[in-house]
Each structure stands twice: as structure tokens, then as C-alpha cells.
Amino acid sequence: MRTIMILHDTLRRDMLSCYNPDTDVKTPNMDALAADSIVFNKHFTGSMPCMPARRDIMCGRLNFLDRSWGPIEIFDETLPKTLSNKGIRSHMITDHAHYFRIGGENYCQQFSTYEFFRGQESDPWVSLIDDPKMPKDFFGEVKRQYECNRTKLKGEADYPSVKCFKAAMDWVDANQDSDDFFLMVETFDPHEPFDVPREYLDLYHDDYDGPHFDLPKYHKIDEETEEAMEHLKHRYKALITMTDKNLGLFIDKLKAAGMYEDTMIILTTDHGYCLGEREFIGKNYMPYYNELSNIPLIIHLPKHEHAGEHRNEITQNIDLMPTILEYHKVDIPERVTGKSLWPLINEKRPVKEYALYGCHGLSVNLFDGRYTYFRAPRRDDCCFEYTTSLTTIRNWLGKEIAEKIECGHFMKDVDLPVYKVPAVKNAIVSDNQYLKQDALYDIESDPQQLHSISDGMLIKDMEQKLSKAMSEHFAPNEQWLRLGLDK
């Protein structure tokens, strides 16, 4: 059995014509893949943002209830290692620099082999003692390290995501006779900075002549002009189009090598992005609207089975691990809480009642097929992180509160002792920046999530569903106290 997972970062579903026929984003190759695949309409992320989402995918269970951004844990049973234990080799091709920073330990090492292409965002790659040429007038941010890295980008072939797809094509040449493997091709694009060769911007007739703007701050629109926001959207769309072009080259290589017909190909992302909706830019600090949470999932099956079909049942990224394992006839570890999608694929039988999603220490959110419910925290003094490794995003976890850290057998389904670290400072977003508010939306009548419902009986029903979902995903006991819920 052959499985290829294509993981893009920050890909919004409404940019793709298979989800939004009115989109103006040029993605002919994703369109063609979708037409030859199953498209999942109610697919949701789980833990956000980048590394929590990747642990979800690799482990088949939610990260955000126990901890924030961090490494693969000692007790984790990952997809590539589980395959390896059955003699199935895996390879990852990535330009995602977070794997190689503090807080990203042990992800790549789960694979049999891996390749990493340098230069995305603030990857500490190009060393310049003197400052590179820096934009003087700009909206958002300009990061010195990325401006250093940008000096190496002389043409499209130099972009890290393009190198990823070129490496994937080379890998196919070297392994086209193999019939049992898992390949993960991951591109940081279309994540910001939305840096793209001019020819792709021209496709969107961009004639912006204002301050430099490709790396927005995560905040509500303030100084950004309407023209600047339109330019930012053009950059994002252009980056999707460049990503799509190189995806198409990879798909063509699979077809030429005779591998497309009998390979399961999964295309998804970790989360979406706000581009001015409700005046929000970015992610993390705002409620988890569907622009962030309802993400694309496209699965191409061998022999074009179910090509062109859409599924309207709930799915999540934690379901990918058990789906892949079942496809390869490998037993699913007991700790996996995701559900194999094969009953849904083959019999159109739902595999789950809800999607539970969020970011550690912030709101906990639930989608039940019709309603989305955002439950904001009621207390900030009873949240903890549980881990065997005291690292988090570019930093050490709990270093300033060493006297408050405990170690013991605190996790319900883990035999090993773990650190229990008070979450006095959120690793992902500052507490005073996060918008704490409950909301309940009817997605059928209000798909844009513009009008929150105040129906008390309906809210009570969603509270009960949320409590049940948290129990089924082994949430720590304090989560109920933190959210003001009955267990």
C-alpha cells in the first residue's frame, strides 16, 4: 500500500473551487485532484496552531487539552513509528522550520528518513553580520532574519516550498518500484510571509503602490488601509497559486511513474487564517471561526474510487492516522482517539458526532454538525501543561516558575510520570490579547458566523455535548473548572 500525505500550512478551504465555486484563486491542480477524489466538507482542525496540529496528525489524538506547543512525548505512539514497527518505511520532506527550533523536538525523527529545506520565515539560515536591505515603510512586521534569507531567493526554484516538491519528484524517481510506504510532503506555504515572485502577483492584477506588506501582525485592522488589505489578499492568493503549480508538477510525476493510480493521496492543512473578516488579521487571538477551523481535506483513492464525491459528515485531522493505519492493515494503538474514515468512505456511515478543537488555555470549541459553540474560560488560575519535556515554542517551559512545577502520575491514560506546569503565561498568545467570549452559531442559517445565538436551552445542550466530548478525549479534570462546566 502506498500513502502520500500533502500537508500545506495555512490553506483556507474557501480559496479552493471544490469548496467555493465563486473563488477567484487559480488552483487548477488542486481542482483536478479534488475532481478525482473525495472532498470532505465538514473537516475540522483539532489543536492549533502549527506544532499542536502536527502532533494531532502524527498521534491521532488531541494535543490542546493537555498542553500547548511542544515536542513529541516519550509516551506518544506516532503514525510513522507505528508503520515502521510493521516494516513500512516512511519519509518526510519539509521546509517547516519549527521542527528544528526549541519546542519542535522529535517529530522528524519519527520517520525512517527526512529532508529539510531552509529559509522559511525566521529560520536562522543565512548569516549576515550587517543588515540586509530592509523596507523603510511597511505595514505589519519586517523580520530581519527573513530579509537575510530572502537574499537567496533569486528565482522561483530557490523558494523552499518549490524545493520540497522538486525533492518529492526526485524521491518518486528513486522509489517508483516500491509498493509499501508512507511519504509526507509538507510545505510551509501558503503561510506568511506571503512572499512570492512577481509573476504570480500579476495573475491577480495587483497594482498596489503603498508600504511593504507581506507579513501582517496578528491583530484587528487599525492602520492598514483598504488598498493594503487587498494587496495582502492578492499575496496570499498568489502564494497558493505558486504552491498549486508545483503540486501539479509532483502529481504529473506520480502519473508518469505509474504511481498515481494505486496510491492514496491525502491533501490537507493545519488551520486557516483571517484576512480581514470581522476586522481580524491572522490567527490564535480571536475566537476560532470557521476561517481558521473548518479546513480542506481531499483524499484520492486508488483506481479513482469515489472520485468527485463529497462527504458532509464530520471529520478531523486526528482521524487521518487511524485511516492510514487501517489502509496499511496495521493495528491502531489504543491511545488513538481519532476515528478511521473507512466506514464513512465506503459506506457513508458517520464516524463521529462532533469536532472538538481549540488552543491550549483558551476557549474550547465544538461543532456538532449544525452548531459551533465557543466556550471561553471562566478562570485563569487552574490551567496546567502536562509534558515529559520542558520546551515550548522557541522557549523553555516553566523556567520562571520552577518552584511551582510538580512531577508525578497526573495523566489518566499515561503510565509515565509527567511535569505539571502551571500555565501562568500562555505559550501561543498573550492573555491580555486573547478575546474571551462565548458564542453559538447556526452554520446552516448563518454560515459566516455573524450572529451569535442566545437560546438558553440550546446553549445548555451544547454545554452537555462539550463536557461529554472532553471526557471522551481524556481532558484533565481542571478543564471543567476552568470552563465553568459540570462534568
Image (cartoon, grey):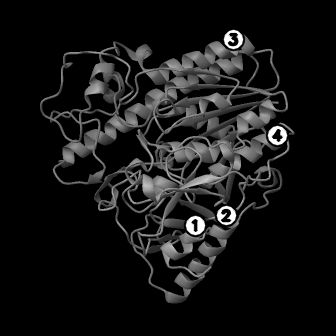
Mark 2 vs mark 1: give the one in front.
2
x 78%, y 57%: residue? 348
Whether label 2 touches label 1, CB < 8 Å: no
Label 4 and label 3: CA atoms lie apart by 24 Å
Q: Which label's residue is closer to the chain start, 3 or 1?
A: 3
Can residue 429 be seen at all in this image of the molecule?
yes
366 vs 237: above or below = below
Whether label 3 touches label 1, CB < 8 Å: no
Label 4 and label 1: CA atoms lie apart by 27 Å
The residue singled out by tag 4 in the image is 327
The residue singled out by tag 1 in the image is 367
Residue type (three-letter) at the residue carrying disc 3? Asp
Residue type (three-letter) at the residue carrying disc 4? Tyr
Question: 10 Å neighbourhood of mark 3: few (<14), some, or many (≥20)?
Answer: some
Residue 163 x, y percent position in the rendering: 50, 18
Q: Secondary structure at mark 2?
A: loop
Whether label 4 touches label 3, CB < 8 Å: no
**Which quadrant, please, contains the N terminus?**
top right
Residue 192 x, y percent position in the rendering: 37, 37
Q: Secondary structure at mark 1?
A: strand
Question: 10 Å neighbourhood of mark 1: few (<14), some, or many (≥20)?
Answer: many
